[in-house]
Image: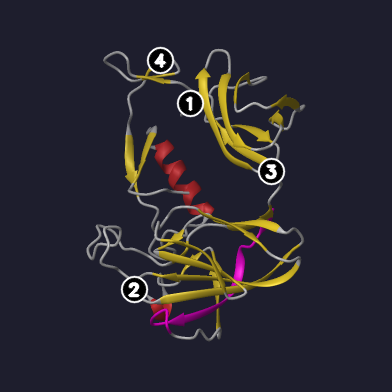
């Protein structure tokens, strides 16, 4: 996997019909309207850079962006999304070698249910999260779902969507297990640790080329009280916006960690992400 974060060529236009003139630079992740001359300005940000691919099939992932994102490769439109703050994955084919990648983002408020003219927060424009590029292995793992079943035994359920005839599965970098023609598996995680607010331990599972983090915990509300891992728990928390006066939703990891530490130091155990996917 190649991380494409860093300084990209940048152009600013008033609308999408203007030809971009890449006479500036911008940081990725970053918001183009968070500060400086474009503070609170509505318009179009064009991010451009060169990429090199060696495989015929590749996957470009934008962790989050908004408000309206369009992806181009060598001038060819590959993908488009109006789902701000959400991941955007673009699988594409290209000849091996160097190509021009452009991510066009506008922050216009449209006559659309997702873009009302009055938010209870400001709708920033830009690339909010990391951008990565990786080769797509064939046949690929299309979806990988992990459901913890028993916090006392470490048993989990894996649901896998793929055309691969063989699955190579490994937990936490350990030994591989090989399974044939399987789309659902019940497995026990070796040397498992239970997840809780006091001990938020995450395991990893790798299925062929896909790796996912997960926590082993169970929730139950069959009685009058919510139970986590069989024990009653009272949720004490806060509403949190992924927004900052200097960075918008492209918040540096250091500030995210600072928020989490403050929440923990206040004796809280719950965060409501208001009102969108957060990093």
N-terminal label among 3 and 2: 2
Tell me the residue that label 3 is attached to.
Answer: 139
Tell me the residue that label 4 is attached to.
Answer: 231
- Give the distance between the C-alpha atoms of the residues marked 4 and 1, in whole angstroms: 11 Å
Tell me the residue that label 1 is attached to.
Answer: 196
Residue drawn where x is 37% and y is 34% of the image? 268
Estimate the x, y position of residue 197 in percent, counting from the top left.
46, 29
Tell me the residue that label 2 is attached to.
Answer: 40
What residue range appears in magenta?
A: 1-17
Residue drawn where x is 42% and y is 37% of the image? 265
The answer to whether mark 2 and mark 1 are in CB contact below 8 A is no
Instruction: Tell me the crowding category of disc 3: few under 14, some 14 to 19, or many 20 or more residues within 10 angstroms, Cα based.
Output: few
N-terminal label among 3 and 4: 3
N-terminal label among 4 and 1: 1
Left or right? Give the position of 261 relative to 142: left
Q: Is residue 199 above or below residue 132?
A: above
- Give the distance between the C-alpha atoms of the residues marked 1 and 3, in whole angstroms: 36 Å
Q: Nearer the viewer, residue 234 or 114?
A: 114
N-terminal label among 1 and 3: 3
Residue 40 lies in what quarter of the image? bottom left
N-terminal label among 2 and 1: 2
Magenta residue check for 228:
no
Instruction: Tell me the crowding category of disc 2: few under 14, some 14 to 19, or many 20 or more residues within 10 angstroms, Cα based.
Output: some
N-terminal label among 4 and 2: 2
Residue drawn where x is 39% and y is 60% of the image? 82
> Does dot 3 land on a helix, a strand or a loop?
loop
């Amino acid at each position: 996997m190649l991380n494409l974060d860093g300084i990209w060529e940048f152009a600013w236009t008033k609308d999408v019909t203007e030809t971009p003139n890449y006479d500036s630079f911008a940081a990725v992740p970053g918001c183009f309207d968070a500060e400086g001359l474009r503070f609170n300005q509505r318009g179009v940000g064009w991010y451009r850079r060169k990429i090199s691919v060696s495989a015929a099939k590749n996957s470009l992932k934008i962790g989050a962006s908004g408000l309206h994102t369009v992806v181009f490769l060598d001038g060819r439109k590959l993908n488009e999304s109006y789902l701000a703050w959400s991941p955007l994955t673009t699988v594409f084919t290209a000849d091996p070698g160097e190509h021009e990648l452009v991510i066009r983002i506008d922050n216009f408020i449209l006559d659309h249910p997702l873009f009302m003219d009055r938010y209870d927060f400001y709708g920033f424009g830009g690339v909010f999260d990391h951008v990565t590029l990786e080769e797509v292995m064939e046949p690929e793992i299309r979806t990988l779902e992990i459901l913890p079943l028993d916090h006392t035994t470490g048993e989990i359920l894996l649901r896998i969507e793929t055309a691969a005839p063989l699955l190579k599965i490994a937990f936490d970098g350990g030994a591989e297990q090989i399974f044939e023609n399987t789309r659902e598996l019940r497995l026990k995680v070796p040397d498992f640790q239970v997840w809780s607010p006091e001990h938020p331990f995450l395991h990893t599972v790798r299925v062929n080329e896909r790796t996912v983090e997960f926590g082993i915990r169970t929730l139950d509300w069959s009685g009058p009280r919510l139970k986590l891992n069989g024990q009653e728990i009272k949720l004490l928390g806060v509403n949190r916006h992924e927004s900052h006066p200097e960075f918008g939703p492209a918040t540096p990891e250091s500030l995210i960690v600072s928020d989490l530490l403050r929440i923990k130091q206040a004796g809280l155990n719950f965060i409501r992400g208001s009102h969108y996917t957060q990093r």
